[in-house]
Amino acid sequence: MFLLAKFTPILPYPGLILWTIVIFGLFWIIMRNFAFKPIVDALERRDTSIQKAMEDSKAARAQMESFKEESAKFLGEARGEQSAIMKEARAAKDQIINDAKDQARVEANKIVGSARTEIDAEKASALTELKKNSGLFALEIAEKVIQKQLIGKDDNESFANGLINDIKLN
């Protein structure tokens, strides 16, 4: 205890300074070999990984820009192709419609022509029948007039009118 009574931290003793420097030096050597070196190595590895990550992100950003430009180019080409296909489709649609109209016109003209031909044929047939019947009627009238003439002249006119009325009713 006697030694502790004289110790004051404010007044350093030369032995205390020496031992403090020796202990601090040993502590520094131990820390440098076992603590600082792994810490520095870890910091360098982290710095390297951060630098690599930054380079990778720059490369990824550049690649994304490249993809963006490429996709914009493909999108422009696709839109161009789309408009060309739509233009072709419209032209094909118009062509099909025009062809259908032309074909319908031709068919209508055929039907109208056929109907006219049929009407003309029926008209000719009716006229022929009318002429034939009118000839037969005229012969019948003439025959009956001649028969009546043989009977008497006064009644010829009234008889012919009666026959005409008779033919109109039939």
Image: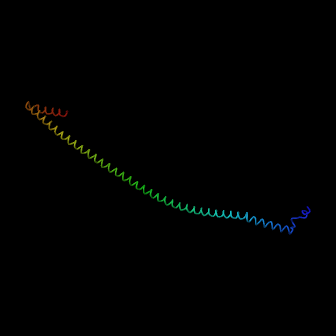
Indicate how the structure is coloured in the image: rainbow
Tally of numbered tags = 0
In screen coordinates, is 94 left or right of 9? left
Quarter of the picture containing the N terminus is bottom right
Comparing 123 with 64, the one in front is 64
Q: Is residue 46 left or right of residue 19?
A: left
Residue 48 coordinates in the image, percent (x, y): 64, 64
The quadrant where residue 145 appears: top left
Residue closest to the eye, 138 or 94:
94
Residue shown at 68% from the left, 64% from the top: 41
Image height check: is 38 above or below 97? below
Q: Residue furthest top?
A: 151
Q: Is residue 121 above or below residue 76?
A: above
Q: In the image shown, does 134 or 49 lie closer to the viewer?
A: 49
Q: Is residue 69 left or right of residue 22?
A: left
Question: x and y percent of residue 71 in the render?
Answer: 51, 59
Query: Which residue is the extreme one toward the right?
Result: 2
Image quadrant holding the C terminus, namely: top left
Q: Examine the rendered structure and indicate whether residue 7 appears above or below residue 132.
A: below
Q: In terms of depth relative to the viewer, which is nearer, 36 or 93?
A: 36
Residue 165's image quarter?
top left
Position of residue 28 measured from the top left corner of the image (x, y, whole percent) = 76, 66
Q: Position of residue 121 (x, y in %)?
A: 22, 43
The quarter of the picture where residue 131 lies is: top left
Q: Is residue 116 left or right of residue 43?
A: left
